[in-house]
């Protein structure tokens, strides 16, 4: 069997499933490049390359994983975020493009040498991107999950940035006197009742600890906002990703904060909440 024949066969297997049809060719090609460890250019340049039996078996295993709706990124172990490469496993949320808006908002507002903490770091996507583009900042990253922290540590090393990692329930393990210039978080924010309506790729494979936050999706914000107030210097920035319909309840939680602002994503949905801790009088 040639590489071209394998690609045609893999595409056909995925396209037979109505929910995988739309991206069948793209997914089959990504899995083929991953199996062979080759680039897209090499795939296109040598369609006649012969596929060994071992390669065929590995490719078939990858296609079968995809047929159970496992996200491509967990099969290949890779996802790009903010132009940087990240290793991902099923212990971490796959970094999403909309989270780049949060990083961009922080980069535009924090000075070069600030102290920043990323709460619920997962793969380390936000913390690593901030550390990379603010090389003089002191970046800390916390998560409740030791498995996520192991992945985040690996990503920091791979992207050659220094980050202090702490296993912590939100900011609980950080000393009260540790005052930050910015607290950044993409916390879990999906209401538990929405689980049934999530795509199986998300519901069955991404860590529930990374997705859900109580009946309304507000549980983590309700704990994080008051903790953030104690851990920010006066005028310090709180920047959080928020979910659909959460602008109003978040605005309520931010009563008493200054410069409260919401940024829309490309679909026009409020996606980032920004606020500054009040100045001491
Ligand atoms: C939505 S994911 C975000 C991951 C990553 N920051 C990103 O944007 O791709 C939320 C993360 O928060 C972590 N988390 C959930 N509850 C937490 C808590 N109480 N304290 C610390 N981390 C928590 C989860 O383990 C998960 O890694």
Image: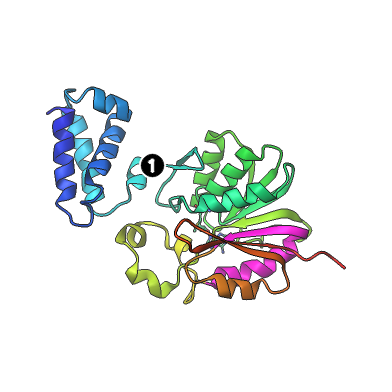
Residue 137 against residue 203 in the figure, above or below? above
Question: Would residue 79 appear left or right of 21 to someone viewing this image?
Answer: right
Residue 17 against residue 111 in the figure, above or below? below
Q: Residue 108 placed where, x, y %?
A: 65, 48
Q: Is residue 150 or residue 265 the one in the foreground?
A: 265
Q: Residue 99 placed where, x, y %?
A: 51, 53
Determine if residue 82 is in view. yes
Q: Residue 202 placed where, x, y %?
A: 36, 59
Is 229 a magenta residue? yes
- The secondary element bearing badge 1 is classed as loop
The quarter in which the C terminus is drawn is bottom right
Q: What color scheme is it?
A: rainbow
Rate crowding at label 1 as few (under 14), some (14 to 19) or many (20 or more) other CA atoms within 10 Å. some
Residue 272, picture quadrant = bottom right
Q: Which residue is mark 1?
A: 77
Give the residue drawn at x 23%, y 52%: 20
Give the residue drawn at x 55%, y 70%: 247
Is 185 a magenta residue? no
Give the residue drawn at x 52%, y 71%: 246
Residue 129 against residue 99 in the figure, above or below? above
Question: Would residue 23 appear left or right of 235 to someone viewing this image?
Answer: left
Q: Is mark 1 within 8 Å of ligand 1?
A: no
Stretch of the chain drawn in magenta: 218-241
Q: Residue 49 placed where, x, y %?
A: 19, 22
Residue 28, picture quadrant = top left
Give the residue drawn at x 55%, y 35%: 159
Determine if residue 37 is in view. no
Q: Is residue 242 or residue 208 the one in the foreground?
A: 242
The quarter in which the N terminus is drawn is top left
Q: Is residue 241 or residue 165 the one in the foreground?
A: 241
């Amino acid at each position: 069997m040639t590489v071209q024949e394998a690609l045609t066969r893999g595409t056909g297997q995925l396209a037979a499933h109505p929910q995988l049809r739309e991206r069948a060719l793209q997914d089959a090609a990504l899995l083929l490049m991953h199996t062979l460890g080759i680039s897209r250019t090499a795939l296109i340049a040598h369609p006649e390359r012969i596929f060994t039996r071992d390669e065929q078996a590995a490719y078939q295993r990858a296609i079968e994983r995809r047929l159970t709706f496992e996200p491509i990124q967990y099969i290949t172990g890779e996802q790009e975020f903010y132009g940087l490469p990240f290793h991902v496993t099923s212990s971490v949320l796959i970094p999403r493009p909309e989270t780049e808006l949060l990083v961009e908002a922080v980069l535009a507002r924090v000075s070069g040498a600030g102290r920043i903490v990323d709460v619920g770091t997962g793969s380390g996507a936000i913390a690593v991107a901030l550390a990379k583009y603010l090389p003089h900042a002191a970046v800390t990253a916390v998560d409740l999950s030791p498995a996520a922290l192991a992945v985040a540590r690996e990503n920091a090393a791979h992207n050659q940035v220094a980050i202090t990692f702490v296993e912590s329930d939100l900011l609980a393990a950080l000393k009260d006197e540790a005052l930050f210039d910015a607290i950044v978080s993409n916390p879990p924010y999906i209401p538990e009742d929405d689980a049934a309506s999530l795509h199986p790729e998300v519901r069955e494979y991404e860590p529930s600890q990374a997705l859900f936050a109580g009946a309304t999706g507000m549980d983590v914000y309700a704990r994080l906002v008051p903790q953030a107030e104690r851990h920010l210097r006066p005028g310090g920035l709180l920047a959080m990703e928020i979910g659909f319909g959460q602008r109003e309840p978040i605005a309520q939680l931010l009563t008493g904060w200054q410069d409260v602002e919401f940024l829309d994503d490309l679909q026009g949905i409020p996606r980032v909440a920004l606020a500054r801790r009040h100045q001491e009088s």
